[in-house]
Image: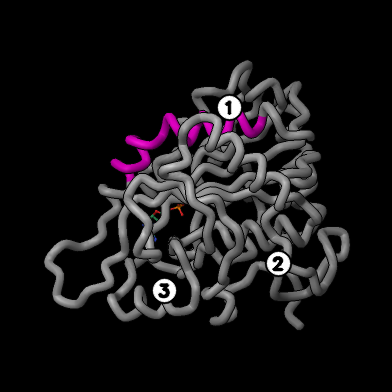
């Protein structure tokens, strides 16, 4: 089996984690990754330390609009958090093992629970633009093509060779999120469903959209799953939410097409509700 590149090794990730901890007084147990257009959550973080990804040697950098590229460490809902304002994607040319670096860094900083968010296209025909989907499970379609951050020599210090993935998304946190949604009157637009990762960067063809629907996918995107695999491998508790920014076109010869501007616009429009949901969840969860 191929050796792990030096930049992915435990000692390097430990160096990155210690370098970050040396710049902040906070000791977060919760990590949050903000997807396309969802980084405004960082505005709610108080008493913060901000570090640009570009200043963290070895961190993957995002080149996509809507991904600020800043690590924000501070207090949210009374708890210490480390929040990634934006993420890197495989379609930008990063190997999946590189996408693993920020998650493993958080783990070695002491993070035990990871929240992942993303912008996604609606596949379930009952969904609407602006819906928030609590992730119940995922399909790693990229993994079917061998794109998986856990491929290669396994370092047991990160986690086991064969990690289970059947309870990837924490049941208690999903239940708590649903009860908060009910209390806040968000029920009409909060769903629970299955996310699928395609590598991208192209949006789906009509036949791909129909295929995803048939195999039980509710929303599709170009991220998140790699992070969840790494987090679960490391024994972290995971909670995920997708913002449905567009409906994936599933009829042939329709004139309109999916585009990233629409994704960012919907992100802005639903941003406040998403922030309320996340910050209340943080406030009420046990850490
Ligand atoms: O980082 P996420 O998954 O939120 O970003 C989605 C997928 C693409 O990067 C982009 C497409 O508009 O949004
Ligand atoms: O329709 C989509 N497909 C894939 N990824 C996405 N991210 C936002 N919308 C989409």
Chain-order first, disc 1 or disc 3: 1
Report ligand 1 position as a quadrant: bottom left
Q: Which residue is mark 3?
A: 213
Front residue of 190/83: it is: 190
Q: Determine the residue located farthest toward the right in the rendered image.
A: 156
Q: Is residue 214 above or below residue 137?
A: below
Q: Position of residue 25 (x, y in %)?
A: 75, 21
Q: In the image, is residue 285 part of the stretch drawn in magenta?
A: no
Quarter of the figure with the N terminus: bottom right
Q: Is residue 214 above or below residue 52?
A: below
Which secondary structure, mark 2? loop
Which secondary structure, mark 1? strand
- Of marks 1 and 2, the one in the foreground: 1
- Of marks 3 and 2, the one in the foreground: 3
Colouring chosen for the image of the structure:
one colour
Q: In the image, is residue 280 part of the stretch drawn in magenta?
A: yes
């Amino acid at each position: 089996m191929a050796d792990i590149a030096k930049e992915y090794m435990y000692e390097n990730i430990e160096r990155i984690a210690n370098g970050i901890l040396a710049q902040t007084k906070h000791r977060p147990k919760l990590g949050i990754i903000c997807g396309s257009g969802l980084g405004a959550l960082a505005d709610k973080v108080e008493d913060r330390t901000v570090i640009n990804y570009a200043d963290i040697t070895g961190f993957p950098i995002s080149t996509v609009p809507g991904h600020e590229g800043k690590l924000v460490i501070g207090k949210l809902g009374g708890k210490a958090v480390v929040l990634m304002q934006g993420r890197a994607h495989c379609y930008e040319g990063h190997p999946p093992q590189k996408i693993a670096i920020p998650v493993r860094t958080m783990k070695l900083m002491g993070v035990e629970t990871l929240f992942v968010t993303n912008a996604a296209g609606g596949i379930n025909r009952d969904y609407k633009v602006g819906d928030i989907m609590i992730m119940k499970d995922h399909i790693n379609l990229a993994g079917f093509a061998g794109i998986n951050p856990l491929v290669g020599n396994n370092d047991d210090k990160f986690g086991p060779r064969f990690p289970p993935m059947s309870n990837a998304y924490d049941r208690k946190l999903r239940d708590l999120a649903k009860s908060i949604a009910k209390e806040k009157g968000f029920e009409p637009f909060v769903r629970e469903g299955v996310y699928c990762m395609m590598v991208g960067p192209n949006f789906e063809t009509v036949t791909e959209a129909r295929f995803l629907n048939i195999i039980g996918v509710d929303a599709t995107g170009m991220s998140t799953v790699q992070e969840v695999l790494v987090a679960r491998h490391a024994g972290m508790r995971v909670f995920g939410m997708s913002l449905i920014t567009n409906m994936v076109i599933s009829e042939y010869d329709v004139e309109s097409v999916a585009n990233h501007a629409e994704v960012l616009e919907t992100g802005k429009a639903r941003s406040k509700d998403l922030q309320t949901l996340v910050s209340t969840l943080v406030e009420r969860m046990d850490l």
